[in-house]
Image (cartoon, rainbow, N blue to C red):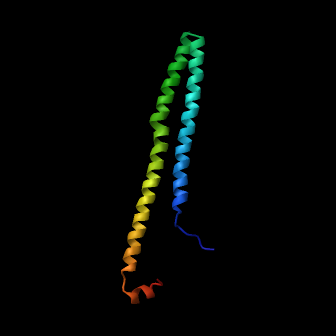
Amino acid sequence: MPKTTQLDPAEIDAQATRHEATSDNIIQQLNQLKSQVDATLAGSNSAATKALSTTCDNWIEGLKRTILANLTDMAGYIRKESQGQDAQDQAAGQEIARLPMETSSFLGA
């Protein structure tokens, strides 16, 4: 059976949704980690615990600026490109439909 290069818009959207879900899952886990670090800080005001809290805050912010932002951006890019491809396909279909009948029958339309 021949393979096709055509992508199903629903599959494309599902992939973008998986990127967003992964980002949401990471955010949830980071929030849990931050809560645990805050609870540890509440129980101990030592310099090591404060350093742990600061390190955790910096690490979380770094992740949000890089990985999480990229996951969200990728989901947007996937959807944007899918819509652009769909528009190109529609425009090409309209151009083919404008061909004279003799030509379109030759092309198998």
Position in image of residue 25 (x %, y %)? 57, 38
Position in image of residue 108 (x %, y %)? 48, 84
In the rendered image of this protein, does residue 73 appear above or below residue 33?
below
> Left or right of 64: which side holds 49?
right
In the rendered image of this protein, does residue 10 appear above or below residue 101?
above
- Which residue occupies 60% across, 73% down? 2
- Which residue occupies 51% across, 22% down? 55
- Which residue occupies 41% across, 69% down? 90
Q: Give the image quarter of residue 47.
A: top right
Position in image of residue 87 (x %, y %)? 40, 64
Instruction: Report the label total.
Output: 0
Q: Give the image quarter of residue 39.
A: top right
Q: Give the image quarter of residue 95.
A: bottom left
Find the residue positioned furthest to the right: 1
Q: Quadrant of the N terminus?
A: bottom right
- Which residue occupies 55% across, 69% down? 4
In the rendered image of this protein, does residue 60 appear above or below residue 73?
above
Position in image of residue 102 (x %, y %)? 40, 90
